Image: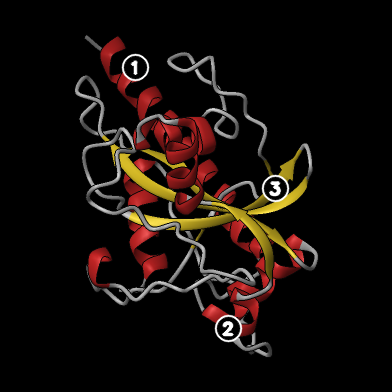
Amino acid sequence: MNIKSRVASTFKRAGTAIKESGVYDAQIPLDDLCADFSDALDLTSVGEAASFRLISWGAAYQSVLVVPWQRPNDRHPEWKGQFAWHNRYPIPLVRSDGVPMEDVTMPTFRLPNRRVRYEIDYDDKVGIPRMPEWYSIVTGETPSGEKVGILANWTFIPPDEPTKTIVFNRVTALMKCKTDAQDWLNDYAKVSSCISSTVEEFSDAEEEAREAKRQEFEGAKDLATEAALQF
């Protein structure tokens, strides 16, 4: 099972599924694409901010990669949501072919003077007590221009809704691409084989699957109501 299949399985538990669509031939070497960045905010930046500001690593992570970029919600109205995704949904970063995430060889993204660190280590205090289940990638707009973002992803099952699975994420890197970020992501998807469709086709397929699942759910509720009315 590749990483897309694993993510599809997760989305199915969360209320949707993903189908395959149009296939590409890769043209651009993956190493070239992974070095196509001029700057980044990443987990190395977090360590630098912690040392410079004399704060804990966890506080620096929240200040550098969570508060500015994550979308605000009821629990976290202080989040500023300054990273507006182009993608409707993130795409998986790699194929794993059924290998546990901790054993997957992840791509190495590089700046001119160092690699981009986006993988969470066991010692990193990101505020979530378990390791990510998978990583995904998006593009989006920030106040200073478009970026490529890497997300660590987890799932959560609400105690009061044991049949429901919620997918949530945290940004672990934002990268400035030397070329158009959306074109870069389509090229990355083709070359890395993380999906077999364009980013837009992937999003369309997932939206279609979500809507089908929603209709199935609503139909099941209606049938339950009709049955109850026979009482």
Residue designated by label 3: 140
Image coordinates of residue 165 in percent, x first then y, are: 31, 37
Q: Is residue 213 visible?
A: no
Image coordinates of residue 171 in percent, x first then y, are: 49, 44
Q: How many marks?
A: 3
Residue designated by label 2: 30
Judge whether 67 appears above or below 106 on screen: above
Instruction: Tell me the element at label 1.
Output: helix
Q: Is residue 118 visible?
A: yes
Residue 143, by quadrant, is top right
Image coordinates of residue 182 in percent, x first then y, are: 74, 61
Residue sitting at 25 percent across and 24 percent down?
161
Three-letter code, disc 1: Thr
Q: Residues within 10 Å of mark 3 (few under 14, many from 20)?
A: some
Three-letter code, disc 2: Leu
Residue designated by label 1: 225
Q: Residues within 10 Å of mark 2 (few under 14, many from 20)?
A: some
Q: Quadrant of the N terminus?
A: bottom left
Marks 2,3: beta carbons within 8 A:
no
Name which of mark 1 and mark 3 comes first in the sequence.
3
Foreground residue among 42 and 201: 42
Residue sitting at 46 percent across and 44 percent down?
46
Three-letter code, disc 3: Gly
Residue sitting at 54 percent across and 57 percent down?
137
Foreground residue among 151 and 214: 151
